Image (cartoon, grey):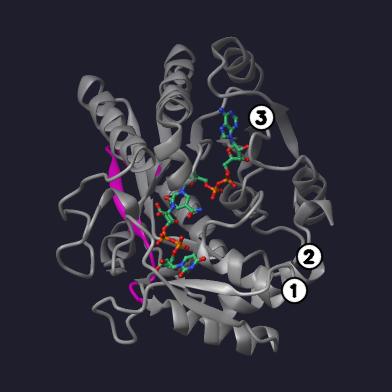
Amino acid sequence: MTTVLLTGAAGYIASHTWLALQQAGYRVVGVDNFVNSSPHVLERLGELASAPIEFERADVCDPAAMDEIFERYRPSAVVHFAAFKAVGESVAQPLAYYRNNLGGLVNTCEAMKRHGCTRIVFSSSATVYGAPETLPLREDAATSSTNPYGATKLMGEQILRDLGIADATWQTACLRYFNPVGAHESGRIGEDPRGTPNNLMPYVAQVAVGRRARLSVFGNDYATPDGTGVRDYIHVTDLAEGHVAALRWLLANTGSLTVNLGTGRGYSVLDLVRAYEAASGRNVPYDIVARRPGDVAACWADPALAREMLGWEAKLDLDRMCQDSWRWQQLNPHGFSS
Ligand code: NAD
Ligand code: WQD
């Protein structure tokens, strides 16, 4: 059985990917230091999982800890999620972001190299496209960064490209996620942001459930159909399946890939609010406020390359994303500490 090491395993996207990988027949070993997640995730995964939950609490920046994990489990591939992800925080604390996101990636790759493991799936982001010039976004579109978080994703991709150039035995998959939302259909795992949510759907969910009074819509004067920002929201379960497909590809082929994981459809802030109201049966009152600095008007993927190379495409629509988010939110109004 192929063993896969998941870093950042207790996090939002990784916890869903853990179940998808197990379902696909992989042995999964999770690593996390809980800097942005709760150990309770592991109990919930234990209920849902089709195989035992194997987990090590460790910091991916710690070389000795990573050595021990590689010696003990001898993984054939790594899916590297561990990173900080808040754009605004990265502007305030750039060094923490460079140290954790790039230091963690380099340290993970060094541990892999010492132990003869040369396949890695990397969590990249649509943020590498900066302000899109044309839509939909294909993988060969220009890239740029406007904040330290985005810079860590651009540089992370570069590090992996350089590794492949230096040594052709390395196989890397950079997955550029668009906007991951939703939750596992069981309502037992989902996104549990600490403090005020930065992202739209978790904020809307907390308004719907009564934890917050009103949503602030960041601008309605963009050049979009209703003036609010348009994004390519993708169900986290579809995203998880994208990782399974990428891992399969790495195991069956030589070479590396960089692909978008998106649906190819854009929805506005107000589209999402309406879909959430319908899914939850609750009102989501909102105020239009100023644009959020750094936001782009619209961003959606051309998902054709992932379909061609991986045979993967997103299946779940916006209504389903809202229904599953709502089930998670309603059953766990205070996240994993509910
Ligand atoms: P998350 O914060 O829920 O998960 C990240 C996990 O990594 C957390 O459990 C955290 O505790 C862990 N972690 C962080 N630093 C660590 C370290 N040094 N050692 C061990 N564990 C560590 O975030 P997420 O939304 O699940 O994102 C996962 C990955 O996907 C990240 O790399 C993120 O940048 C990327 N990504 C996320 C989005 C999004 O909107 N959620 C979009 C594009 C890309
Ligand atoms: C979506 C839309 C907002 C909150 C961010 C990161 C990106 C990636 C995903 C990691 C925009 C509007 C939001 C609110 C609002 N992360 N909005 N009120 O900005 O597309 O992407 O998360 O890689 O790097 O930048 O997602 O969910 O924050 O915003 O009106 O309270 O909702 O202006 O139009 P974004 P988001």
**Secondary element at tag 2:** loop
Q: CA distance from mark 3 to mark 1?
A: 31 Å
Residue 260 falls inside the magenta stretch: yes
**Secondary element at tag 1:** loop
| Amino acid type for the residue under numbered disc 3 | Asn
Q: Is mark 3 within 8 Å of ligand 1?
A: yes
Tell me the quadrant of the picture where the C terminus can be found.
bottom right
Q: Which mark is residue 333?
A: 2
Q: Which residue is mark 3?
A: 33
Q: Which residue is at a point 54% across and 87% down the rendered structure image?
A: 274
Q: Residues within 10 Å of mark 2 (few under 14, many from 20)?
A: some
Q: CA distance from mark 3 to mark 2?
A: 24 Å
Q: Which residue is at a point 52% across and 60% down the rendered structure image?
A: 199
Instruction: Indicate the quadrant of ligand 2 in the picture.
Output: bottom left
Q: Is residue 338 above or below residue 104?
A: below
> Which region is colored magenta?
252-266
Q: Residues within 10 Å of mark 3 (few under 14, many from 20)?
A: some
Tell me the quadrant of the picture where the N terminus can be found.
top right
Depth check: give the residue in front, 308 or 274: 274
Q: Is residue 59 above or below residue 259?
A: above
